[in-house]
Image (cartoon, coloured by chain):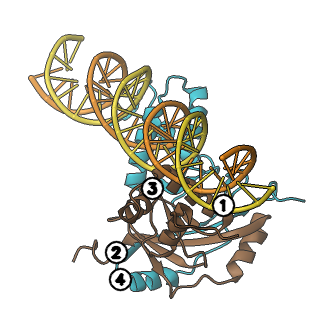
Chain colours: A brown, B cyan, C yellow, D orange
Amino acid sequence: MERCGKHFRKRDAILACVRGTDVHPSADWVYETLRQQMPDVSLATVYRNLALFKQQGLIASLGTVGGIERFDGNTAPHVHFVCAGCDAVIDLPQMTVPQSLSSQAAAEAGGQVHVCQLTFTGLCSRCSPK
Amino acid sequence: MERCGKHFRKRDAILACVRGTDVHPSADWVYETLRQQMPDVSLATVYRNLALFKQQGLIASLGTVGGIERFDGNTAPHVHFVCAGCDAVIDLPQMTVPQSLSSQAAAEAGGQVHVCQLTFTGLCSRCSPK
DNA sequence: TATATAAATGAGAATAATTCTTATTGACAA
DNA sequence: TTGTCAATAAGAATTATTCTCATTTATATA
């Protein structure tokens, strides 16, 4: 039942990479980051496994920023801020979405609600004119 | 100063198309819809003008659903529901986001907030198992 | 009216993010 | 060792979107 010998397990490394950062990475960021420790990793493997993790609920997709999909290793519900200047995605952990909103949404939509995403867009402190 | 003679103004038609529907259309939906009345419209023109309107703030982008960008002719802030089954995007006009949240977000992010987007994802009534 | 200039468009090529295909590799069991 | 199956690398294929450029249309001007 031992899953891993001396050989690399790319899949585990990809999951650890997404979970070990707060930059809300793109597939390419994961690829370039892993490549430094694991030069023979393939971009297709990164895409394949990110899609798998997303489907399994191990990671979340934030949608696209500047046309590129971004992921989040933190699947607990939380609020995001997206900078339109530098495409940074930042957590706003102090903000919370009232629990009541989801059930209200389900009622109004007449279906089931699985995910609630609250995202603010603007300019981060670095990109704001002084 | 008259802008329009007997000839078609594709640009105006594209804006009217996006504003005249609540399906939150994709570029291709706009193209196919316009083509029925205006067979010589070009897909490039649709994309070109949607990007222009977005930049001018005349329409809003909702990000991608299933890898395809969706637009909204209603730029007033409101809440959306996205069905993961059929990719429908539905307005939830009765729901409102507390105004206080945006200033709270600006404070926590340390920058400026321009847009607040609240989106619920789930299964619509049609796609929900009975 | 004629003409010049700038804006808007159509058609198709180009781009780039993502997905797919296929041969290969590695892990594990018999 | 051998068979089987999952995971992977490499690169081709796909597809939404953007770009190029020649043409058309609108508008200003003489």
Q: Amino acid at mark 4?
A: Gly
Tag 4 residue: B110
Tell me the distance, in whole angstroms, between the alpha carbons under discs 4 and 2: 6 Å
Chain letter, disc 2 residue: A
Residue kind at label 3, given as amino acid type: Val
Nearest to the eye among marks 4 and 3: give it: 3
Q: Chain of mark 3?
A: A
Any mark on residue A55, and which? 1
Q: Which residue is mark 3?
A: A41
Q: Image height check: is A18 above or below D29? A: below
Image x and y of residue A96, in percent: 57, 85
Within the image, what quadrant is residue A50 found in?
bottom right
Q: Earlier in the sequence, mark 1 or mark 3?
A: 3
Dots 4 and 2: beta carbons under 8 Å?
A: yes
Badge 2 amino acid: Cys
**For numbered disc 3, what is the local secondary structure?**
loop
Q: Is residue B73 visible?
A: no
Residue C21 place in picture, x, y as percent? 60, 34
